[in-house]
Amino acid sequence: MGVFSRTLSIQLATISRSTFGYKPRLSGLNKQQKYQYALLKQLRSQPLMATGYLLTTIGHDFMSDFDVIIIGSGAGGAPIANRIAKKGKSVLILEKGPLFRPQYQTKDGLSDFKRDELFSTGTEKRLQISQVANNNGEYYSSHVEPDINDEPHIYREKDGSDRATIEGYTAQVVGGGTQLYGAVHLRFTAVDLKLQSFNAGRTDIKADPNGDIEREARDWPISYEDLEPYYCEVEELVGINGSAENQLKPFSKNFLQTPLSPNPISEFAHKGMVQLGQNYTNQGKTIQPYRTPLAVITQDHAPSGRKIPQNPETIKTSYVNRYGDPLGLKSSTWVSLLSPIENLPNFQIWTNCVVTHLDCEGSRVHRLYYRDPAGREKTLTVKPGAIVIVACSAIESIRLLKLSAAANPEFDRRIHQNDLLGKYFLTHCFGGAETIVVGDQQQYPPLKFDKSVSLDSDWAIDYTSSEAFLKENGLWAGAAIYNNTSDQALPISLGRTHGSQDLDTFWKAFDSGYWGSITGQNNPRFLHGQGMVDFFNENFGTRLSVSFMANQVPLKSNRIELHPTVKDKWNRPVAYILKDWHSHDKYLMDVMAKQCEEILRLGGANPDRDAIEEGGIYLAENALTRIANHILGGARFGSDRNDSVLDINCRAWDFDNLYVTDGSFMPTSGGANPTHTIEANAFRIADHLLARI
């Protein structure tokens, strides 16, 4: 049994990152380091003890000296790692997926992310899960999404059948969902955080016959004023462009970078927003549109060291939403928060490591069980005083906690000190309107625009979150409205969204779908031969959509459980999604979709209401599974232990060192995309942790 010095063990810990998913770069090592690396490879499967700073191993049991261990590298985990590592505390991240670097971080100048629709979508596969109704159905998963046959999410359909889906998975890669998201980075409003107070005693709320809203709504235990400084930190450290002016959310500081010029097609949305916003005021001014905040840098970003191209306009690309960025300009948590601390001696990230469950002694989580990149079972012992943070995205975090409870009665008793874990699962009410842009004079052929030269959104407006709008329409909560500039900007994405098909089945749009030409000739037209050519001529580069993102009514019956029969490839029960839409959700979506329709009509995109498609996601064929990959709730925080899973600092009530910091902490889903708020809250929690470790 060899004993290594502290210095050598730190070097080995750095060099050995390839053991946990990093590609070894032996060409960059000196002779002594190569010897050390070879020695580590030789001994890594044998009993080994290192008396170093970060790690001691005996057989398959790792004795860690990390102050903080974080499971997940996305929006809920990376801000904590960044803050705490910079303060000199030792941090380990365990990440289920690989590390994909942007071009500027690789020696050959190539990235594992590609601007290629087929590469990013993957090849056709077939479900082989006998317990589900869509067994043998075709599906697609990209190179950073799980194979559904290995790790499905199961949801219950309206008819009571179970179906497998990829919905609810963001991405399995360093950076998590921030690698693939469209990067819309909106703050929540102050009202979003106090919906219980806002709705108390109201008699004007529509489509809520049983009073569910007043009974189930919860205020957050923190206010907008508590969170606002951390919103500023995200905007500074992550790198976001957009405009603060005209937002309903107050800014104490403005770190937003200058937005790029909007795509010309977005002007139709802008004009419509201007007209509708004139009906509402904020602090004596009419509510007007603003440039949508996007987590894409448009100027050199000092905190992360990223540089923009010489011509900033070349940043614009429709390969944003659902695509990793090979240039590293989209502000994933890897390029913005983790890459800047990568070389600190007190920080490590182990990739391709799947945490299977946690164990506890009394109130302290003292051991993590995981599988290494080779699939071997390993354990990691948590030193006394260290913190364990679960940030796997809400569905998988809840699943991990429930799996841990199933393995240990003491863990079960503590995490289930009430019956709320997994309950009040949330996503967003979402939908919108879209049309072929024909202009006021209904020009045909329709107007064409190069939508591939754009980011995900150009304009947003907040009037649908104003208190006047909410009370005028009998709504319990508001919504963000923004145009989707890059929506359907690429040929496969156009086909995938035709008929509201999701990624599970998108080829069906081309294989058996049909469409109706706005000319009315030869309808319906099949998507074959000349019909497909005509479809692209009429629809490609001609469509404009406006979307809303709104609060969903929290219901205890919307929940995440462990499926009783379906197991993953490691023989663990998979997540079981049980959810439905409340009657007020449907009403809210109808109201917001009409607002999106009016924006397009009044903006001159199409004067014919009948030619504008509008609606909420509840109308989709597979509405119960569609969640926009905004995975929230299920472990809400609060100030009352009997009414929440986590305390105000996102610590599990009956544990001393267990925190949950992804979107599962939210008691309400907010009227905007959630990433900005998850990151801001994570920075808040990091400050709390620094005071106790």
Image (cartoon, rainbow, N blue to C red):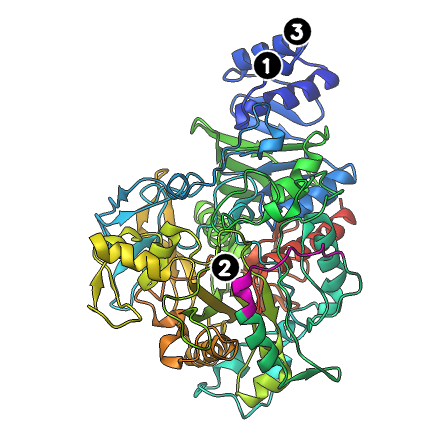
The residue carrying mark 3 is: 31
Mark 3 and mark 1 in contact (Cβ < 8 Å)?
no
The residue carrying mark 1 is: 26
> CA gap, disc 1 to disc 2?
40 Å
**Amino acid type for the residue under numbered disc 1:** Leu
Residue 432 numbered tag: none
What residue occupies the far bottom of the structure in this picture? 203
Instruction: Specify few, some or many for label 1: CA neighbours under 10 Å numbering under 14, 14-19, or 20 or more.
Output: few
Observer able to see residue 238: yes
Classify mark 3: helix, strand or loop.
helix
Residue 460 location (% of width, % of height): 60, 68
Instruction: Kindly report the secondary structure that dominates the magenta region of the rendered protein.
Output: loop
Q: Residue at x 66, y 6 (%)?
A: 31
Front residue of 104 and 26 = 104
Front residue of 548 and 642 = 548
Please state if 297 lies on the left or on the right of 160 as rendered.
right
Please state if 522 lies on the left or on the right of 118 as rendered.
left
Observer able to see residue 51: no
Q: Which residues are magenta?
A: 255-267
Residue 412 location (% of width, % of height): 49, 53
**Amino acid type for the residue under numbered disc 2:** His
**Amino acid type for the residue under numbered disc 3:** Lys
Quadrant placement of the C terminus? top right
Quadrant placement of the N terminus? top right
Instruction: Specify few, some or many for label 2: CA neighbours under 10 Å numbering under 14, 14-19, or 20 or more.
Output: many
Compared with 636, 305 (above or below) is above
Is residue 173 on the magenta stretch?
no
The residue carrying mark 2 is: 630
